[in-house]
Image: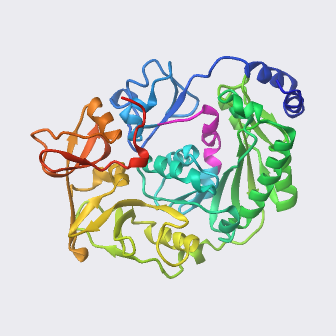
Amino acid sequence: MNAEFCNLVKESLPHDAAERLLCALSGTELSPTIRLNPFKTKGDVSENQCVLEVLKGAEELWCKGAFKLAERPDFTLDPAFHAGAYYVQDSSSMFPYLIADEIDSALGANGVLLDLCASPGGKSTYLISLFAKEGRIFLSNEAVPKRTPALTDNLAKWGVSHLIATNRDPKNLGRLEGLFDVILADVPCSGEGMFMRSSDALNDWSLRTVEECAARQRSIISDIWPALKEGGLLVYSTCTYNHKENSDNVRYIIEELGAEYVPVDKALAIVPGLLKLDYGYQFALGSVMGEGQFFAVLRKRSGRSLSAAVASKSQKFPFKELRVNISDNQKNTFFYNRAEESIYMMPSDVAERMIAIAEAIEGAGGIGRYVKMLGCRVGTVKAGKVIPDADFALSAELQRCHFEMKFEELKAALQFSVAEVDRGTALRFLARENITPLPEWKQGYILLCYRRLGLGFVNNLGNRCNNLYPQERRIRKRL
C-alpha cells in the first residue's frame, strides 16, 4: 500500500483507528446497505411486498428505514429498485440522520435546502426523506453536466415534486445571496473511502491529488458561502480520511469565512465507533460499518438573507397555472410551460416560490439550460391529448390523481388506465422490449405497475404496445 497514504492516515486519525483502517482496506467486501423510500413504502416492513425479497435476512441499521442486506442481490433485475422503492447507499453516507435535529431546526417552516454536489442523488433523496414538510423546498445541484442525468433519474424515482434539480457552478449559485437555510456540501474529494470498491481509486491516489482536492474544496465553499443565510447551517462532508481535506478545511471555513463550529456529540452514542476529531466526525473503515465518511456542521455567523426577495420576483418564465377538474387533488398545482408545451406538477404551498427560484437560477426563458427538473413533469400536450411523461409514472402523488385529468384551458386531457404486471413483464418493459397487451387491457395509455409501484407508461394500440420508457434509463443487462 502507498506509504504516503499510510503516513497521512496516521497523521489524521487516532493511532488505533488508523491501524484498523489500514488493516481493513485489505479485507473482504462489505455487505450492501439500502434505504427504503418512505413515500412509497410503509413503516411496517412486513406490509411491503415490493421489498420483502431483497430484505430477507436483513439487519436494520442505526438509522430508521435502513438495512444491511444478508447478501448482494442483482439490483438491476429488481423492478422495485427501478420504481424507487429503495436506494442502495453506503451506511456511512446516511450521516444526516445523526444531525436531523439541527437541520430540521434550521429549515423551520419554509426553509430551502441545497444539496450542492448532489449526483448521483443518494444524499438528496435521504434529505428529502428526513425533512420533507409543507412549505419546504429542496434544490439538488450538480456542476458536472455528464453527472446530472444520474441525479435527475434518481430524484424522479423518489417520486416527490417539491424539488428543483440544477446544473450550475457553485459561484453562480453563490449569487443567490441568503437564499438557503441549509447547504449540504459533499464536496469532490480524493476518494479514499472508495478504496474498498475500486482499485483504481487507490492506484490514482497521491499527495498532490489530495492538495489539489483540498484547494478545490475551499474554492467551492467560498463560492457558495454568500448563498447561505445568516444563522444557516453548512454541512461539510467528504468520503475521505485525511485532515487536509477534512479538519483543515473546516478550520479554514471557521477562520476565513466566519463560521461557528457546531458539535453534535450525541452522534457518538448512536453510532458506536464513530470518531470524534478536533473539527468534525469520521466514519472510518474498521471502526464503523461502511466505507467511510467525514462530516462537520457549521453555522454562518453573519451575512445577508435575501430569500424573500428572490421569492417575490416577478415571474418571467413562460408558466401558466392551470385549472384541473380534480376535486380531491388540493395538494398540487399544475402549470403549463408554453415554450415546451409541457405540464408540470408542484405542491401548491411552494409552487410560486419554486418557479421564482428556478427563474433566478435560469434567467428568463424556458427551463432546460441550467434547471433540469422543476417539480414533476406530467406530460406533453399534442393534438388535444397529454402524452404522459416517464417521471409522472414514478410520482408518489399518483395516488392522489385520477386517471383522467382535463386541462380545460388547453383543451387537452390526460387519460390512462392501470395494469399490474408480473416480474418478467416488468423487466421486459424496463429493457424497452416489445410488450404484448393482455386482452383485458384498455386501449390508450396504460400505467404499468409492479406490486403497486408505478414503472412507466405504454400506449396500447390493440395488437401491440408502444413502450414509452426512456431509452437512456433502459436496462442494458441481458435478461
Q: Quadrant of the C terminus?
A: top left
Q: Quadrant of residue 179?
A: bottom right
Q: Position of residue 255 (x, y in %)?
A: 88, 57
Q: Position of residue 115 (x, y in %)?
A: 61, 54
Rendered image coloring scheme = rainbow
Magenta residues: mostly which secondary structure?
helix
Any magenta on residue 96? Answer: yes
Taking the image as shown, residue 215 lies to the left or right of residue 167, namely right
Q: Residue at x 71, y 47 (%)?
A: 188
Q: Is residue 252 above or below residue 267?
A: below
> Is 11 or 61 nearer to us in this picture?
11
Q: Quadrant of the N terminus?
A: top right
Q: Residue at x 58, y 50 (%)?
A: 147
Q: Residue at x 24, y 35 (%)?
A: 421
Can residue 283 be seen here? The reply is no
Q: Residue at x 50, y 82 (%)?
A: 314
User: For the magenta stretch, what is the residue range?
Assistant: 87-102
Q: Quadrant of residue 197?
A: top right
Q: Is residue 4 above or below residue 225?
A: above
Q: Position of residue 27 (x, y in %)?
A: 70, 17
Taking the image as shown, residue 75 lies to the left or right of residue 166, namely left
Can residue 435 be seen here? The reply is yes
Taking the image as shown, residue 23 lies to the left or right of residue 58, namely right
Q: Quadrant of residue 192?
A: top right
> Is 381 or 86 nearer to us in this picture?
381
Any magenta on residue 7? Answer: no
Q: Position of residue 212 (x, y in %)?
A: 82, 49
